[in-house]
Amino acid sequence: MLTAFSRAFKTPDLRKKLLFTLGIIVLFRLGSHVPTPNVNYTKVQACIAGARQEGTSFLGMANLFSGGALLQLSIFALGIMPYITASIIVQLLTVVIPKFEELKKEGQQGQVKMTQYTRYLTIALAVLQSATFVTFARNPSQLFNNAQCTEILNSDSTPSILIMVLTMTAGTGLIMWLGELITDKGVGNGMSLLIFSSIVATFPSALWAIQQRDGRWDLFFIVILLGLFVVTAVVFVEQSQRRIPVQYAKRMVGRQMYGGTSTYIPIKVNMANVIPVIFASSLLMLPVMVAQFQRGQTLEDTPGWAQWIDANIAPPNSGWHIALYVSLILFFTFFYVSITFNPTEVADNMKKYGGFIPGIRAGRPTAEYLAYVLNRITVAGAIYLATISLIPLVAFGYLGPAAQNIPFGGVSIIIMVGVGLETVKQIESQLQQRHYEGFLR
């Protein structure tokens, strides 16, 4: 693999793409540490230190995707989350809105329009999320879960708040542009690479927090060894797929003979990727967020339902939290797969072009067979997602608050492995075009 990297850098055009991508990532990470106007950076750092000692924050996942920029209130505080949310919404709307479904079928031209809609929705969501987050920043004790954190803004005036909202929104637009630059002029997969860099940036601090908790180096190395085992397992599952053979009959079009070829339909074990985990985590955040705004100065001033949520839903290692989390992941896995893979549509397209599955009649029997296989594969994928997502919660029970952002589990490990494998494949394909050995040999 190291030899392949050296050969990649010896190729002028590929070296230019790699260096361009690294430069954009460095610029993105630098922007994650530039504070937003009207924010007292020193007080923010003190609040973050206190929050790490006292417990977790319900904005942990969003902070993970931003590489720690969210809780630092930087110009890139929102990170790539508005774009991820917009992309998911647009993808779901293709099932609900006929116009979006038509655009999806138009090919490259339709994809350009859908990308444009995604950009507009990203900016709208960025305005909404930045305004919400600035509202949280006006009450920092709840934002950082630190009672000693009382004030982090230099001014509470309306113009200052508007400048903060505009700055964070502009930061999201800039991140979106940087990601598209990587896709067009770099090695590709720009948005995913920015998420990858954000998650990797939290690795050193997360691992060091585990060592600092008890000062035990043996525990530190055990966590690393377990992490390597988890990475290996995730790579194995992410590469696993069920290949359904498809045979195309020969047919004459004029004087040309078409068809007669064999191919397959690849059905991945994890077809939903990390979408169900994001949905489940976001849905669990809602009651916790509402309960935080209902907290009084004393326990007697807090409503009973808010106390119950704080005691049963907010703690990540509680039975209620784990049960709801797993149930939501299982539900959203089946839901997302059902709207992204339509067995009836696939069967109709196969029949239209003369394709069939050996031993299965074309048309409705093919659709029923595909649905049967898809359901069985989705069960395994849903259990896999739930298991990986529970790793940080189980670690929290053993390691305490130091494991709140343990990097070897949940969304982080799936994204890192998926993006890493995809990037390696893209670079490998470019090397193979130049008759070089690939990364995976």
Image: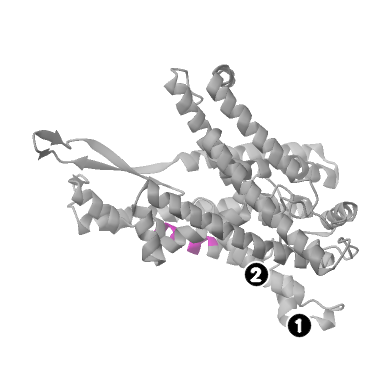
Neighbourhood count class around disc 1 (C-alpha, 10 Å): few under 14, some 14–19, many 20 upward: few
Q: Main secondary structure of the magenta part?
A: helix
In front: 295, or 169?
169
**In the displayed structure, does residue 154 sit left or right of residue 359?**
right
Crowding at dot 2, Cα within 10 Å, few <14 / some 14-19 / many 20+, comes out as few
In the picture of the structure, the residue carrying the numbered disc 2 is 286
Spatial distance from mark 2 to mark 1, Cα to Cα? Answer: 17 Å
Residue at x 46%, y 58% (from the top left corner): 91
Residue 195, quarter of the rendered image: top right
Is 78 included in the stretch rendered in magenta?
Answer: no
Q: Is residue 103 visible?
A: yes
Mark 2 or 1, nearer chain start: 2
- Mark 2 element type: helix
Give left or right: position of 301 versus 305: right
Q: Amino acid at mark 1?
A: Pro
Across and down, in percent, residue 346 comes to: 29, 53
The residue range painted magenta reads 329-338
Q: Is residue 186 left or right of residue 266?
A: right
Above-or-below relation of 244 to 95 = above
Examine the rendered structure and indicate whether residue 61 appears above or below residue 3: below
In the image shown, does 16 or 377 lie closer to the viewer? 16
**Magenta region includes residue 336:** yes
Q: Give residue 303's mark.
A: 1
Residue 284 position in % (x across, y down): 63, 66
Q: Residue at x 80, y 37 (%)?
A: 217
Asked which colour scheme the image uses, the reply is one colour
Name the residue located 58 percent from the left edge and 54 percent from the top edge: 83
Nearer the observer: mark 2 or 1; the answer is: 2
* Place of residue 207 in the rendered image (x, y in percent of width and height, measured from the top left): 75, 42
Mark 1 element type = loop
